Image: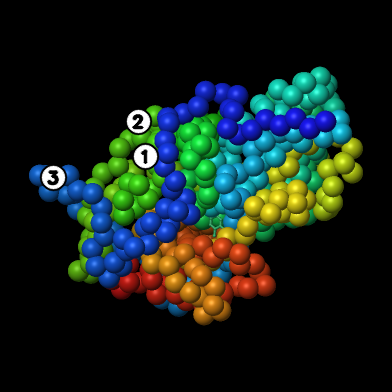
Amino acid sequence: MRTTRSPHAPAAAAGPELSRRTFIAGVAAGAGALAIAGRSTGVRAASEPLEVRSMVPPRLEAANLGERILCHRPMRRGSPNLTVEEVGGQVIAHDYGHGGSGWTLGPGCATYVVENALAMPAAAALAKDAPVIVVGAGVIGLLTAYELVRRGYTAVEIIAEAFTGTTSHNAAGLLAPVSMDNDPESQALIDQIGVEAYRFFASIAAGTHPDFATGASIVPSYFETREESGLEPYVGIVMEPAKDVILDFGNGTQRTMVVYDDGIFMDTAVLMDELTAWLTPHVTFTQGKVEAFADLPAQLIFDCTGLGAAELDDDASVVSVQGHLVMLRDQVPADVNTQILIYLPEGTTAEGMKAKRSFYLMPKRLSGSGPNDVGTVGGTFIEGATPETPNESEFDLLIDQAKVFYGI
Ligand SMILES: Cc1cc2nc3c(=O)[nH]c(=O)nc-3n(C[C@H](O)[C@H](O)[C@H](O)COP(=O)(O)OP(=O)(O)OC[C@H]3O[C@@H](n4cnc5c(N)ncnc54)[C@H](O)[C@@H]3O)c2cc1C
C-alpha cells in the first residue's frame, strides 16, 4: 500500500497567497531587461533623489582569479519533491530537487518534511532509538539529520556517496528563491518555507542561534528589480522593503539598482563544516551508494539525494542545471562584502548548449582559504549540462561580463 502526503497539503499554515513564477522563468523574463552596458531598470521613487552609494569594484585582474568551480543544481520540474510515502512498511520522505535554492529553502524544507514524515502512523509508532536513515549528505541531508537529532532521535545514520565537494559546498550563498521551477500552486508553501529559512539564517547572523555561531551574515543584496529578487514575499514578514539606489563605482559608471539591506549571505562551505561538526557526535556517517530503499535496514528513511534522485527514484523530472563560479583572491574583503545579481540575455555556449546567463558576486569563501581570498563571480544556468559537457568557455565570459557591469 502506498500513501502520499503532497507538498500542496502542508501540515502547517500556508504563507501569503501568490501566483508568481520567479525562478527559471524569472531568469528568462529578466534576460530581455538587461542592457549591461547601459542603465539598469530599477523602479525609482517619484520625487526624491536616489541615494548614491559608492562601491569599489572587486579586483578582477588575472592574478585575482582563483579556483574555477563547475557544479550542477538538482532541479525538479514542477516543484521540489517534498512528499512522504509508505512503501512495503517503510516510510520514505523525499526532499530533493531544489534547483538553485537548496540553501535558501533547506532549513524550512527539513522541518516541513520531517514533520510530515513523523505524522505518518508507522513513523509515529517508532521509538526514538529506532534506526533512521538519511540518504545524502548535501545541505538537505545534513539539515534533515540535524532536525531529527534535535527531536530526540538517537540512531540516525547518514549514507552518502559523497561527503565533500558536493553541490552544497560549492553553492554561491545568496538567500533568495531563484532558479528553480515551481507550479503556481506550490508557491505559497515555498514562500512559507523560505520565510522560516530566513529566520534560521538570520539567527545565526545575529549570534542568537543555539547551535551555529558562524556562516551566515546580513549583507546588502542588489538586484535590478524587486521581482527578480524573489524576496518580495518575505517583505513585511521578516524583511524590510527594498530601496532604489544608485551604485557609483568611482570610475564614471553608475547603475540604478534595488537593494535589500537585510539580505542574507550563507557562507556555504563554512556552514557545511559547521553542520558536519555539530552532527559528528550525534550521528553515524557511512559512505556508499544506495541502490534501492528496500535494501536499507530502517523503517524511516529520508531521501535527500539531489540529482541522485533521478536514478534512485526513477524521477525523470529531475534535471541538472549547470553553474560556473570563479573564486576571487587577494581582495579587500570589505569591497566584496556585498551580493549582486543581475540577469543577462540568453545565449549559446561555445559547445552549442543553450545558456541562461547572469552576473553575480557574493562574498563566498572556500574552506581553509586565506583572509583576503574571498568572493565569487557566477553564474550560468545551463539545463541538461553535466560534468561531461563542462562548457569551459563560460568561465572567461563570466569575468568579461563582470568587468562590463563595473565599467572596468
Ligand atoms: C553554481 C551554483 C550556485 C548556487 N548558488 C546558490 C545560492 O546562492 N543560494 C541557494 O539557496 N542555492 C544555491 N545553489 C543551489 C544549491 O547548491 C542546491 O540546491 C543544494 O546544494 C542542493 O542540495 P542537496 O543536498 O539536495 O544536493 P547535493 O548537495 O547535491 O547533495 C546530494 C547528496 O546525495 C548523495 N547521493 C545522491 N545519490 C545517492 C545515492 N543513490 N546513494 C547515496 N548517496 C547519494 C550525494 O553523494 C550527496 O551527498 C547553487 C547551485 C549551484 C550549482
Residue holding disc 1: 232
Frontmost residue, 258 versus 252: 258
297 or 206: nearer the eye? Answer: 297
- The answer to which image quadrant residue 367 occupies is bottom right
Mark 2 CB lies closer than 8 A to ligand 1: no
Measure the C-alpha gap from mark 3 to mark 1: 20 Å
Residue furthest left as drawn: 47
Instruction: Please give the name of the residue rendered at 30% of the width and 42% of the height, measured from the top-left corner.
Output: 242
Measured as percent of width and height from the top left, residue 343 is found at 39, 60
- SS at badge 3: loop
Residue type for callout 1: Glu
First in residue order: circle 3 vs circle 1: 3
Does the image show residue 82? yes
The residue nearer to you, when weighing 188 against 184, is: 184
Residue at mark 3 to residue at mark 2: CA–CA distance: 22 Å
Q: What residue is shown with label 2?
A: 236
Name the residue at 71% across, 29% down: 117
The x, y position of residue 40, in whole percent, is 26, 60
Colour scheme of the rendered structure: rainbow
Disc 3 and disc 2 in contact, CB within 8 angstroms? no
Is 379 positioned to the left or the right of 120 in the image?
left
| Residue under label 3 | 46
Q: Amino acid at mark 2?
A: Gly
